[in-house]
Image (tube, rainbow, N blue to C red):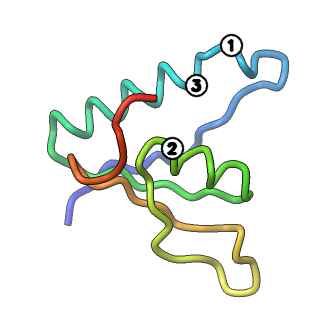
Amino acid sequence: KPYILIAHFGADPAHMGKGYGKILLNYIIGLSESKKLPLVLEATTKPNRAHYEKYGFKAVDWVAGNPDWVLMIRNVGKSGPGKV
């Protein structure tokens, strides 16, 4: 099944909290919705997982021995409130 993979997503600590990531993630979500393709990413910490859940991502699998490292999917039009 086709999907859009967010392979790497992070910020330089000096620029965190300025909204750049939020703008980019909302753009990618819009692209996903317009193309009708789900988004897929890996989160490696509990705070990151909680952050992506705000955007409608759901954890669907995890790395054995490390439950904080999860595979997350945001289905088109079905997951969460959309823009945050």
Answer left or right for 15 relative to 30. Answer: right
Q: Secondary structure at mark 3?
A: helix
Percent position of residue 8, x then y:
58, 43
* The image quarter in which residue 35 lies: top left
Instruction: Categorize mark 1 by other alpha carbons within 10 Å: few (<14), some (14-19), many (20+).
Output: few
Answer left or right for 74 relative to 49. Answer: left
Q: In what quadrant of the picture does the N terminus appear? A: bottom left
Which residue is the site of mark 1? 18
* The image quarter in which residue 82 lies: top left
Measured in 3D between alpha carbons, the distance from the residue under mark 1 to the one under mark 3, in whole angstroms, is 8 Å
Answer left or right for 74 relative to 69. Answer: left
Q: Secondary structure at mark 1?
A: loop
Viewer-nearest of discs 3 and 2: 2
Q: In the rendered structure, which amino acid carries the disc numbered 3?
A: Gly
> From the viewer's perspective, is residue 16 above or below residue 25?
above
**Residue shown at 37%/24% (left/top)?**
27
Q: Secondary structure at mark 2?
A: loop
**Residue shown at 54%/47% (left/top)?**
52
Which residue is the site of mark 3? 21
Q: Which mark, by number, is residue 27?
A: none
Measured in 3D between alpha carbons, the distance from the residue under mark 3 to the one under mark 2, in whole angstroms, is 13 Å
Q: Which mark, by number, is residue 54?
A: 2
Q: Earlier in the sequence, mark 3 or mark 2?
A: 3
Viewer-nearest of discs 1 and 2: 2
Instruction: Categorize mark 3 by other alpha carbons within 10 Å: few (<14), some (14-19), many (20+).
Output: some
Percent position of residue 20, x then y:
59, 17
